[in-house]
Image: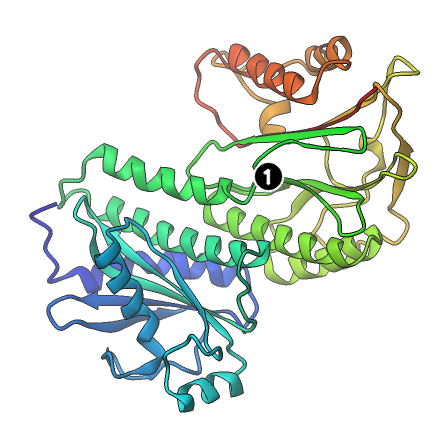
């Protein structure tokens, strides 16, 4: 990395940023979210404007930007923190209109008038020496709140976008730069860890329900997602989702899905309203060829009833202990999220009582349809037999057995798709 030539890094950054900008623009994210790419010139200690995803009313139109420009304070601050704290990737976030923001009052007032309330900045770096070549700035139309899931999602989005630019830039410059494989792998691993950090940290055991999930990504970032959490009044919410596609597009869509789901389900337990609103949001931001398969559910701890909407989820195994048989939930699908505004979820809610010994297993197609090196697909009957024979064991044990079965079946061949499973068991 010592022979890095920075003289043409601005042109390289512009070229690399193009596909990222096009990708984000194709999602048609809200115009109140402003994502801007800046190129940093260490000799002049200034920024050049590379590209907007959406025009930012706070950003000057001229090319050269100095520290005196208040709108770029956080880009400089992010780099300064990077230097002093020595972190490989460092995001700095702040409420623009809050007392902790050091901007002049006139800049704060202008931001508030423009409807901009918070900013997150993330440097884009190259090499083992972490040479800063740019900054991704994302402005938002709402304030950040400490220790909240929504703020975590906003920071993760900024990180993933910056990581995508970094990966493309390093790949583009491989012919000219000496980049050790371990360094690039570390960066990609960091991106994966950010996305994984939005997943539950531990199993959930509440009211006799034993819930656990796992997601293994095929690439550095992906479109699978699951979550479960306790609602304010004590019931349990959960979801499994799979965005059509791979890479940054799928990742941004799935994070948008989760952000809306988590926010709405915490305010209202009307699954139809939640699904209809998610569908409208996803339809607005996704290209016509992209959609989300999802399973959304709420468990009432008062009567042990699981209410759910199946929005295109095709890989469901629900074993009923008293019937000693599987019950079909896959045929109760009501349509894909984001595929059409004509889809209506008003009558899409189904429910089933879970008694001790019942087990629900939700999987994405990367797991339930995985392919081995011979091109053979894993047997659904074998998966069902594993559940049937082990449904009295803990969800964690069955989850381990499920992924072990997949590993043995794949026999070391490359994982082609993200693999996600969520298991809910009613304990005795």
- The one of 185 and 97 positioned closer to us in this rendering: 97
- The one of 278 and 108 positioned closer to us in this rendering: 108
Q: Is residue 375 above or below residue 191?
A: above
Residue 316: horizontal and vertical position, in percent? 75, 28
Q: Residue at x 53, y 61 (%)?
A: 146
Q: Residue at x 19, y 35 (%)?
A: 180
Residue 282: horizontal and vertical position, in percent? 65, 57
Q: Quadrant of residue 135?
A: bottom left
Q: Quadrant of the N terminus?
A: top left
Q: Is residue 314 above or below residue 105?
A: above
- How many residues crowd mark 1 within 10 Å: few (<14), some (14–19), many (20+)? some
Q: Is residue 308 above or below residue 393?
A: below
Q: Is residue 224 left or right of residue 57?
A: right
Q: Residue at x 47, y 83 (%)?
A: 111
Q: Is residue 74 left or right of residue 376?
A: left
Dot 1 falls on a residue whose secondary structure is loop
Residue 12: horizontal and vertical position, in percent? 22, 58
One can see residue 14 in this view: no
In the picture as drawn, the residue positioned furthest to the bottom comes out as: 106
Q: Quadrant of the C terminus?
A: top right
Colouring: rainbow
How many labels, in total?
A: 1
Q: Is residue 419 left or right of residue 383?
A: left
Q: Residue at x 28, y 61 (%)?
A: 81
One can see residue 50 in this view: yes
Residue on which disc 1 sits: 200
Q: Quadrant of residue 406?
A: top right
Residue 151: horizontal and vertical position, in percent? 53, 59
């Amino acid at each position: 990395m010592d022979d890095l030539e920075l003289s043409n890094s601005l042109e390289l950054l512009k070229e690399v940023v193009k596909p990222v900008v096009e990708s984000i623009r194709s999602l048609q994210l809200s115009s109140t979210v402003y994502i801007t790419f800046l190129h940093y010139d260490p000799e002049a200690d200034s920024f050049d404007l590379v590209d907007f995803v959406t025009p930012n009313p706070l950003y000057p139109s001229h090319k050269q930007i100095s520290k005196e420009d208040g709108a770029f304070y956080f880009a400089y601050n992010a780099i300064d923190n990077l230097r002093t704290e020595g972190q490989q990737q460092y995001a700095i976030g702040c409420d623009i209109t809050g007392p902790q923001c050091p901007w002049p009052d006139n800049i704060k007032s202008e931001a508030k008038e423009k409807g901009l309330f918070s900013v997150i900045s993330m440097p884009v770096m190259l090499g083992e020496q972490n040479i800063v070549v740019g900054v991704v700035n994302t402005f938002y139309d709402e304030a950040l709140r400490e220790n909240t899931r929504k703020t975590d999602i906003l920071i993760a989005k900024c990180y993933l976008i910056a990581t995508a630019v970094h990966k493309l830039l390093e790949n583009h410059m491989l012919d000219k730069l000496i980049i050790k494989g371990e360094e690039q792998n570390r960066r990609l691993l960091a991106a994966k860890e950010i996305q994984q950090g939005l997943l539950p940290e531990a199993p959930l055991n509440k009211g006799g329900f034993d819930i656990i999930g796992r997601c293994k990504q095929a690439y550095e970032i992906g479109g699978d997602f699951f979550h479960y959490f306790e609602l304010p009044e004590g019931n349990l919410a959960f979801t499994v989702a799979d965005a059509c596609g791979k890479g940054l597009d799928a990742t941004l869509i799935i994070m948008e899905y989760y952000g809306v789901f988590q926010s709405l389900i915490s305010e209202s337990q009307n699954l139809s309203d939640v699904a209809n609103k998610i569908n409208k949001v996803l339809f607005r931001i996704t290209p016509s060829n992209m959609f989300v398969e999802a399973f959304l559910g709420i468990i009432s701890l008062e009567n042990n009833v699981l209410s759910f909407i199946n929005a295109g989820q095709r890989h469901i195994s629900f074993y009923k202990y008293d019937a000693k048989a599987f019950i079909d939930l896959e045929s109760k699908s009501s349509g894909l999220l984001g595929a059409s505004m004509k889809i209506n979820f008003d009558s899409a809610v189904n429910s089933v009582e879970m008694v001790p010994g019942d087990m629900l297993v939700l999987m994405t197609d990367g797991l339930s349809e995985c392919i081995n090196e011979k091109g053979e697909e894993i047997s659904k009957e074998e998966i069902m037999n594993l559940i049937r024979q082990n449904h009295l064991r803990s969800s964690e044990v069955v989850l381990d057995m499920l992924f072990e079965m997949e590993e043995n079946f794949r026999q070391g061949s490359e994982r082609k798709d993200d693999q996600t499973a969520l298991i809910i068991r009613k304990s005795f």
